[in-house]
Each structure stands twice: as structure tokens, then as C-alpha cells.
Image: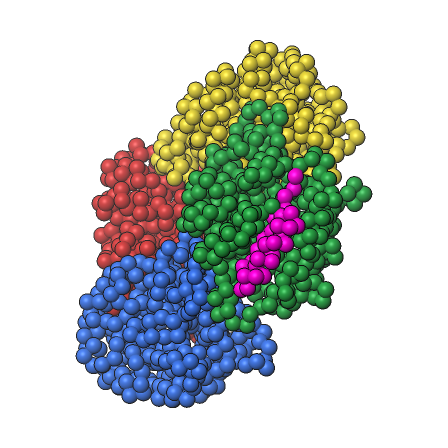
Chain colours: A green, B blue, C red, D yellow
Amino acid sequence: MSGDSPAWVNLHELADAAGPKLSAQAAAYFNGGAGDEHTLAANPADWQRLHLWPRTLAPLDGSHTRTMIGPNAVAHPIWLAPVAYQQLAHPEGEVATAMAAAAQSAGMVLSSQSSVAVEDVANAMRTVADPAGDVAPLWFQLYWQPDRALTLNLIQRAEAAGCSALVLTVDAPVHGVRDCERRAGFSLPAGVRAVHLPHGVAQASTLAPLLQAAPTWHDLNWLREHTRLPIWLKGVLHPADAALARTAGMDGLIVSNHGGRTLDTCVSTAWALPRVADAVQGELPLLVDGGIRRGTDVLKAVALGAQGVLIGRPQVHALACGGALGVARMIRLLRDELAVAMALCGCSDLRHANRDLLA
Amino acid sequence: MSGDSPAWVNLHELADAAGPKLSAQAAAYFNGGAGDEHTLAANPADWQRLHLWPRTLAPLDGSHTRTMIGPNAVAHPIWLAPVAYQQLAHPEGEVATAMAAAAQSAGMVLSSQSSVAVEDVANAMRTVADPAGDVAPLWFQLYWQPDRALTLNLIQRAEAAGCSALVLTVDAPVHGVRDCERRAGFSLPAGVRAVHLPHGVAQASTLAPLLQAAPTWHDLNWLREHTRLPIWLKGVLHPADAALARTAGMDGLIVSNHGGRTLDTCVSTAWALPRVADAVQGELPLLVDGGIRRGTDVLKAVALGAQGVLIGRPQVHALACGGALGVARMIRLLRDELAVAMALCGCSDLRHANRDLLA
Amino acid sequence: MSGDSPAWVNLHELADAAGPKLSAQAAAYFNGGAGDEHTLAANPADWQRLHLWPRTLAPLDGSHTRTMIGPNAVAHPIWLAPVAYQQLAHPEGEVATAMAAAAQSAGMVLSSQSSVAVEDVANAMRTVADPAGDVAPLWFQLYWQPDRALTLNLIQRAEAAGCSALVLTVDAPVHGVRDCERRAGFSLPAGVRAVHLPHGVAQASTLAPLLQAAPTWHDLNWLREHTRLPIWLKGVLHPADAALARTAGMDGLIVSNHGGRTLDTCVSTAWALPRVADAVQGELPLLVDGGIRRGTDVLKAVALGAQGVLIGRPQVHALACGGALGVARMIRLLRDELAVAMALCGCSDLRHANRDLLA
Amino acid sequence: MSGDSPAWVNLHELADAAGPKLSAQAAAYFNGGAGDEHTLAANPADWQRLHLWPRTLAPLDGSHTRTMIGPNAVAHPIWLAPVAYQQLAHPEGEVATAMAAAAQSAGMVLSSQSSVAVEDVANAMRTVADPAGDVAPLWFQLYWQPDRALTLNLIQRAEAAGCSALVLTVDAPVHGVRDCERRAGFSLPAGVRAVHLPHGVAQASTLAPLLQAAPTWHDLNWLREHTRLPIWLKGVLHPADAALARTAGMDGLIVSNHGGRTLDTCVSTAWALPRVADAVQGELPLLVDGGIRRGTDVLKAVALGAQGVLIGRPQVHALACGGALGVARMIRLLRDELAVAMALCGCSDLRHANRDLLA
């Protein structure tokens, strides 16, 4: 990466740099939010609005970003969120992203709407050796399918490919009111499709079949019985749902509002995270996504009870700007910012971070 | 409607699209608010500021938007607010609006300042068959008249035309300080007038006669005795007035600040609704209007205790943009957004929506 | 006034219209505030931020704006604040303002820095007959003078001219940090001066003499002994000072921050008024000024415990735009807005207005 | 200073005036903040947001700005913050600043990254006689050095040069995420360097050595034993750290977030000051810096428990605009604003200022 003097020094500049690299339709798809994009804006704003209350003169020798995410010891808590159709951003798509994840020891959650097959993604990760020997887990995200055979097939492919957890998305039984996509007349270009699914994602012309097929708490039993992998639910915002998830034997929760892409004016994830954390009392591991753009945001998320964070849009921006190297640089930059934020807060180990760090 | 690829995908774009379709005077009349338009701005802003706190994995099969408004079982809770002089927006005026309402099973409240006679409006609604067989009620809005004989005549015409309720506006004993109208020098063009009233609406040159003629709680007794129709009061914001309305035998309340057109800096309807709902404790049905622009706003209004909502300015914008088809499309779009919002909140029936949906 | 179709329909437009009528120096003097003009902005903003919570269907027949200000029965509660050097805005200066006040039955507080003699101002008011026979009181504002003989001379002239109260300004022992004046290099043009004072207002080059001459609670005894007129203190914001004023035998208080012209970031008058009102418990009459620009602001001020309001900058803007007719029109417009606001709140008499009107 | 009619009347205009005087790199270095500059913006905003609640008619004769800072009786509480590399702003650098400080009786804290030797700075201060005979203390700021011998050498030089206190910076164990510097590719130009340090400030390429060398509470014992000077800690924001500082025998605290240059989104100093003041209960003297731009800000800081304030960026802006005369004028302007603010609040002595002055 040394040769390219990169034009961006933070994730905001990265988003700007990605602008000219994406087609108008791809930009509408990746960047847009639901409705008037209040939640899209609230996600980053609410992290920024939290104030750090730093401590001084604490011993910092030996500080590190290592932590646990579920049962995984990881080099740092910055993971990649599931993002569909990454070939819209770069010809190598999810393969490039996966190589970056492996190189930076970042866990990756592959979308079931990936434009590259999970087997190829898993292979790509194995080809890249993290110099420090840290493991970068690959998880598989699942949209509940109307057809259980198809769902089962997805699960089995993910297991066979070596994915170490399933992530069931529960906050999108229907497509959000995505005006910018409609305005842009978004459709997938030739050559890009959801390769794990029969015909890409068919947009139902009425809601009724989607509502009929939407997963319920009851369906989790079937899922639990049909995989040996840990199951995380993605899209939980309410403490009552967190409690139900524990009862249903889930292995972890991702506090998420789908990046502000489904229900506009819903609560931000920075607002919801501590409430969900209070509900699970450490009994279920939590991740969070939505609006994380700075190392300080990562530290705040951990202080509020998340084991780690998922990065969505910046992943695509970095992919568009620089392929695998771009994504690797984005992860590294965030991780360095996290290390700086920890030092400036007097925090040498993320496992000691808690709400005392916040004003 | 399929042929016209419409230029707008939400009600904000609809408002923009209506701009060039309206004369400057008509735009000043329909769009303007009182004073510095603080309340005009606060109405939509306060709905948007309420945060939804969605639930996941609830059963959604069989979800629907059907509900009750007073004694009426309706297909959905999105009604049309009384708006005067609709021929300012489209030559067919209230007839076009009524056809759209009937086609979309939306209740319609006809203004007593309608530019089309109530009999013609009622006829238009009857000519349109809702494919689902749902009923679209027609109600008649009443401004109290200095002359009781005239008031009685209006009531009797409304009854004879088949209106199923009267709506007495109580928040406008005098005209608001409508600066934009004064600046535009608004006056009705030739050919548009309030056909139910003797000379259109005469603007008194002093306040005294208006104040003398303003309706009081006492006048409601007379009204109650002179109609067999249910009577709703429109423009109630204070719980104490809600209690008085119950005592006065009213049949329902419309929480409204006249779309921010009368008293500037008065409370927004999103703020007032839960307070009025607390006061009536379900004993009086409530509707609400003012700033509803999204399906999420409709869901929030229902969650806060309204049975339904009234749509004002977007009705005129849609009428200006596309006549009956435009209004029908606007209603449909809002209804679809409502259905999506319900699904994303885990709500399959509006009658289960309550304040738990809000953060 | 009928012939001139006026270009402004509210006080904001009036301020705009006054722009080209004032020299840059006069505009800096009249419009500017202290420091960064936070308080200048907060004064109107804090009135607007208060929300009215209207009542409906109250009897409005016989509504009026009449009220008491101290011992004076007045036609309405809108008075003119003391503003210095009005010949900067119009050649007729305070004489034109006084004629407008008399014509509109508005009390006027003449600045001791008037550019016209108090005798001429008093005469001008007497020449104008209010058609309704209402009295428009003339009060005299006093800046404490280093020389008691001069102070006494001012008092005696005011008494002899027929002023019915003295207003001692207590919030300006030193000149505020008025950057816009300094930037504009403000100085009085030839022909305009404070005619009651020896050499206009000399700007001391150091603070020490001003601080030495600043009035204290102790000086009020002397003042109390040397005039038979009621004494009001202008510039009180703190309840503790209100209590001291009662003990000192003062006759009334004007809650004011000098229009944001002295101490920047001090509390707004809308914020201070209810706290001062709580302290005096009706035992001392209150007026308020600062940022009143709408009839709704006047109603809110009365609801919060003021008997009336003083209008500062709009007085000068109207004077610059239209001389006496301009000022008269400004007062009338505010009074009409007040009457509309009262009707829309269900308030027929200002003496019944209280905090229940506010949300 | 009389000859140059200065272009600026307040510190905001001074900042604007400094723009063209600084190279793009110097401007990035001096003006920039960490991250998205939330804290940079919050520092001044939070002072401005505090509202003064003035008292009237208090005796003001004999008012003055004299106060104590630690054991030092000083003419006023406005001191100069440590700012590195001042030759970037003006060829005379810290010597010019020191002359201004002495002329205006303002204490100065010299940065250990000074571009001029402490001996020369101390000499410059001695050559300037304050006409009033007030003393302007010179303090020496210390960054903890990896090498204790170097630290000791710095301390001994400071002592020998006549510095009367040491200020240990504790909020910057690592460099902040200073994007604007990175974007500008900031590096020191030829001829400007940190003359007290071996090679200027070497930017470590990894964090580990910095973290290893960061000072801890434990290191304070060594420091306490190796100097006879009072030791102040700069960068304390948390009450718990304030308590530890007392236990560690420190002599004073500077509540600071490094001017928003290290940890973005950390608490503002206006927010932290009263909390730290509550913790120390007057047992440790406090100074504060960050965003002080007006005399009213100084008064608020004192009212919240600081003995005085430090001025950072405006010092450099004034130096760039006018050398020693510019800095002197900046201090004088702030001091005059402070005197005006005190008079307008009824405060004749800063030692009587407390939280009653704030709303």
C-alpha cells in the first residue's frame, strides 16, 4: 500500500473518495437509508454525541486491543458487517473483502446475498496469513427463506465452507421504504447476482407473501435443530426481544437497525445498546453496528456492553476505492484510532472498559 | 395510473412537484401557516422526532391495516382532512378528491367551504366502487355560522346528501395571522367560491363580530338537538377541553391545530395527542392531523391513541399534480408505507399498537 | 395610512424594510447587541420557544385588550421602550414616536438620552387625541448621573413636563462590549445629541469613574426622597433583586436585559420573567422587554406575569420606515395580533391569562 | 500600539485576521483539533451556553480583577497556555509572547516544545516592566520523557531559569488523531524545532514505545522528589483523578482537554470544571483552558471554581498578527471584557464570584 499515497485519512473522507467510484445506482443502493434517513443520520450522530470522560496517568504499558467475541479470541473488535452484492463496488467483490479481513484479523460476516460463493470467500481468507497468527472468523448471514429446503441448503453450504457461526437477520421481514433506490430505479446490473439464491432476490409485488414467510420465534427451534453452529440474531433493538432470544437458545445478538435501511425514525443503535446490555446482563454476547466511523465510537460501543462492532458502508467504500488493500487500510485505520482512544482514556484492555468511561 | 411514471416517491417530493402546478396565490393559501410558521414546521418535525422501538420475529402472517374509526370499520386509518376551495388546485376540485377517496377506501371530511356542492361530492363517491367492497365514509365539516338558520341549512344538506358525521371546527373563531396570504394578496379567483355559503367567506374587517359569533360550549347543545349525526369536534388540543367535550355528548375529537394555520407557536399535534388520549381514556374516539407525511407517522399516531389520521396539504398537492389519480396514489403510498412500518415493528394489527412501540 | 400600501406585514419584514433607511452607523447602534449577540438572539427565540396550549369554545363576545399597568388603566399592554437618539432614525425623532404612541394609546418611556426635549415630546402627545379617549402615559427613563444636581434637574424637568413615572435603568453601569458599534466606529452625527445631558454621553476612557458613579441600592433612598413620581427599575432579572426592590419602596420592575446590548450570554427575559414574577407574588407590577415581535409573544409575557411589554428595536425600524405613521402602524399590528392570539387561545380578558395557557 | 488601528475588536476577528498570516501547515497545526473536531467546537460553545444571571445596584466602586493563582497574587486571572513551536507563527516566537505576558502581568506557561530556550524567555520577561509593578509568573510545561535524565535536565533548566512552577501534561500519552495535520502533511520547517529536546519531537511509528513511556501516578513520586517547584497537572477532567492528584501531593490542576487536540468527543472543560471543583473542595487550586474567548467566559470559569484561565490559540493568532504588541493587545482586550462583565454582573471582586452568577 506504500506506493499509493492515499487520499483519505478518515472514514468520512473515504466515503467522499468512494463517490466517483460507484455508479449512481450502486451509490443509491449502498449509501441510501429508509424514508427520510433520520435513522441513517442518527446512527453516527448518537455515537458522536456520547462524551468520553478520560482518566489520566493509568499504566498503559502492554496495552492491546485483543478481546473475545463469543468464544473467539480476536486481535481486535472491529468486524465486517454483511453487505450484499459487493461486486457492485469492485469486480473482485467479497473475495477482496475477505482477503482484507484475513490480513487484518478482522472477523467477516458474509451476506447470504453475496455476489461471490461462500466457498470462494472462505478459500480467499485461508490464503491470507495474518502475520500475527490471529484468526479471522468467517460467519454466514442468513435471510429466512420461504422454502425451508433452501434455508437448510444455505446452512449446510456455510457449515461445509467452514463458517463458524450463523447470523439470522430479523429486522427485515419486508424491504424498507428505500426512496433513494426507487428514485434511482435501482436494479442489479448484468453479472452481479446473489449467487446463493435461486434468482437473486425477487422483490415481491405485494407484501402478503413476505409477511407469510417472515421468520418467527417459533421458527428458531427448527433452525436450532438444523445446525451445529452458534446462531446470532441480527437486528435486535428491544430488551424484551433480547430476553426471548436467550430463552430460544441463541448464542449472541447483534444490536442493529440494518444501517438505517429498513425502519426510518427507529431508535439508533447507540441508544439501544445499553438497554439491551442491561437486559442480557452479560449472559449473551453482543455486537453492534450502525454509524461506527471512529475508533472512539468502537471504544464507546465496548464501554456500553458490546464485545465488538461491525462496519458496513465504509467496507464498501474502501472496496470501491482500493479493493482488498483499501479494505485492509480501513480496518487498520479504525484499529489504530481505537488504540489511540484507549490510551487517551487510560484504558489498556478493552475488557476493563465500561460505562465509567462515558460522561 | 400505470402509464404515468410518477415523478415522486414520497410526500415531500409530491409537495415539490405541486409547486409549479399551483398559482402563487393558491400556494400561499394552501401551504402557508400562521405567523412565523413555527407550528407548521413543528407538526411534521414532532412526529419524526418520536422514535419507534421495533420488535422482531412476531408472527406477521395475516397482517392488515383494517381498523375502526368511531363506529366505522375501515380498510385503513388514513382519511382526508377538510380542505377548502379545492378548485384552486384542480378544475374538478372536491369531486376528484372524493373519487380518489372512494377508490382507496379512505374516509373524506368535506369542508363547508368546499368549492363543489356536497351533493355532487357524495354522488362522485358513490360512482366509484372500491374493489374490496370497503366503505369510504363522507363526513361534513362545519364552521359555525353567525346565522343559526344557515347552520341548520348546512346540517340538513349534509344529512340529506348522506354524510355520516358532522365535524365542527373549534380552533378558528378568527382567521389566523396568515402573513404569506397577506403578502400574496390572496383572494379567490373568479369561478371559485364556497358554494355552500352565501357569499363565499366574507373576511370581517374587525374582530368584534367574529368574536360575537364564535361558538361556545353552550351552542353545542343546540347543535346536538338539531342533528341525528355523530358530532366530532376538530381542533381540540387540551385535555380539559376533551373532558368538556365528553360531557357535552360529542362523539369524537380531532386533535388538530388547523395545520399550523391559526395560532403560531401553539403545541404540535404529536405533543398534544397522548395528553388528550390520557384524558379521554378510550371513552371518545380520536383522530389527529397535522404533519403526517409518512407511514411511520401514521403508526405513531395510532400508537399514541388516535384511531386514524387526516391528511391535509398532501391531498391538495396530489390533486394539483394528478387529479383523482394523484390523490389515489398519495393515499395508496401512505397506506403501503404504513403496512411496511407495521411489519418492521412486528405489528400485525393496528388495534394492538400502543406506546410500547415508542422509545 | 390607507394610501401607502405598506411593504411589511409583520415586524420581521419591518426590520428588513428599515435596513436601507438607516445609515450603517445608525444600524450598528440600534440593531447591534453585546459580544457575540447570543442574548440578542435568545430574547426573541425564547418567546417563540414557549408553546401556547389553547382552549376552545370559550365565550369570546366582548373580548378586549384593556388592562392595568401599575395604576394606569390602558387600552392595551404594548408600550414603547426607551430608545436613545431617535433622530438617528428619522428627523422628527422622539416627537414622531410620541404622536404615534398617543394615537395608538400606547404608553411611552422616553430615554434620558432623547434627541428631543421631554417638554416637546409631552406636547406632541397632548396634540394627538386617541379617538377612544384612552390615555397614553409618558414616563421618563433615567440613567444615574455622577452629579446629583444633574439627576435632580432631570427628575424635575420630567415631573414638570407631565411624566407620570420615572424608570431608573440599573443594568448598564458600564457600556456593554458592543463590537458592532466599535467595528462601525459609531459616533453621533452633527445635529443629534442627548439634549437633556450636558455634552451628549461622554464615553469614559477607563471604567473606574463609571464604576464609582454607578447607582447602588443605597442611592435609591435619595431618589425616593426627591421625586413624587412612581419609580420603576429597568433591568432586573434576578428574584433576589426583585425582593430588594420591594424593600426599597420601588413601584414596579421592568424585566429586561437591555435588549441584549450589555451583558452577552445573560439570561433571556422570557426565562427570567416567571422567576421574577414568582418572587414578587403580584406585590410589584412587572413589565418586560426584549425580543417581543408577535402578538403571541405579548400574550405569553402576560401569561407569565407581566402587565405589559415594551417594544424597542421595532419602534426605531418603524420610525425609520414611516415616521409617526410607521410607528402607529407597528403598534396597531402588534395589538391586532394580540387580539387574534387571545381569541385563538379562548382568552377574552388579559387579566385571566396565566401559565395554564402555556404548555 | 496606538499607530496601528487594529482590524479586530474581539478574539473571533483575531482568529480570522490570523488566517493569512499563517502558512497552511502552521494553521493546520495550531488550529486543528482531533478527529471530527467535536470537542474543539464544544469547548467554546459550552462556555457560551452557560447563562449569566446578573445582579444589579451592587457597589462597584473599587472593583478590580486582582486574584490569587496558587500562591501568586496576580493582577488578573488571564494566563497564557503552553503552545509549542511559536516561531511557526512569528520569527520572535516565545520571546515576543513572553514580553507581552510581562507587559500585561499575565502568567505564562512555557511549552517544553518551545522553539526558544527557557533562559531567553525568562530574560525577555524580566526586561519588560509592568507599569503597575505586578508580577507575571513564568511556569514550565513538561512532557514526560522516556529518559529520566532528560526529564531531570528539563526540570533543572526550568528551575535555574527562574520558572516558579512545573506543569506536567497528563492528557497526551500519545498524539491525538489529528486529521487536519495529516491531511496537510505537517512537518516542522527548517529552523523551527523544540530546542529543549534532543531532536525536536520524534513521531514514533508505533504506539508501543509511547505507551511504555507514558507517565503514571507512580512516576509522580519521582517527580515530586526531584524538584522544589510546585507541580501542576494539566489535562485532568475526572474528579477521581483530581482526588488522586491531591493524594499524590500535587500543587494544582489544570482542567483541560488539550484544546480538543487529543481525544475527540471527550467532555468539554466547561462541563468538567464544576465536577472537578466539587471533588477538590477548594483544597487544590484549579486553572482551566479550552475555548475561552470572551471576558464573560473568564468570569464563568471563575464562578465555576477556577482561579484563572489559560489562553491557547488566540495567543498564537495574536502573535501571528502583531508579535508582542498583538499578544499584549489580546490579553488587554480579554481583561477589559472581564472587567465589564464583572460590573454588569454586580461583581466587584473575583473572589466573590460563585455559581450564583450562573442560571
Q: Position of residue A140 (x, y in %)?
A: 60, 51
In which quadrant of the rendered image does the C terminus of chain D lie?
A: top left
Asked whether residue A146 is in view, the answer is yes
Q: Quadrant of the N terminus of chain D?
A: top right
Report the span colored magenta.
Answer: A135-163
Magenta stretch contains residue A209: no
Q: Name the residue: 58% across, 13% down.
A: D222
Front-lying residue, D35 or A110: A110
Asked if the magenta segment contains residue A153, the reply would be: yes
Q: Residue at x 57, y 57 (%)?
A: A152
B229 relative position to B315: left or right: left
Q: Is residue A238 above or below residue B156?
A: above
Q: What residue is at 54 percent from the left and 40 percent from the top?
A: A70
Residue D106 drawn at (x, y percent): 57, 25
Query: What residue is shown at x 63% (from left), y 59% (from top)?
Result: A113
Give the image quarter of residue A26.
bottom right
Of residues B30 and D102, the one nearer the viewer is B30
Q: Is any atom of residue C251 visible in this view?
A: no
Q: Which of C140 and D354 is in front in this view?
A: D354
Left or right, A296 with reference to B113: right
Is B214 on the left or on the right of A248, as rendered?
left
Name the image quarter holding residue B118.
Answer: bottom left
Residue A307 rendering spot, x and y as whole percentages:
54, 40
The front one of D200 and D133 is: D200
Q: Position of residue B293 (x, y in %)?
A: 46, 67
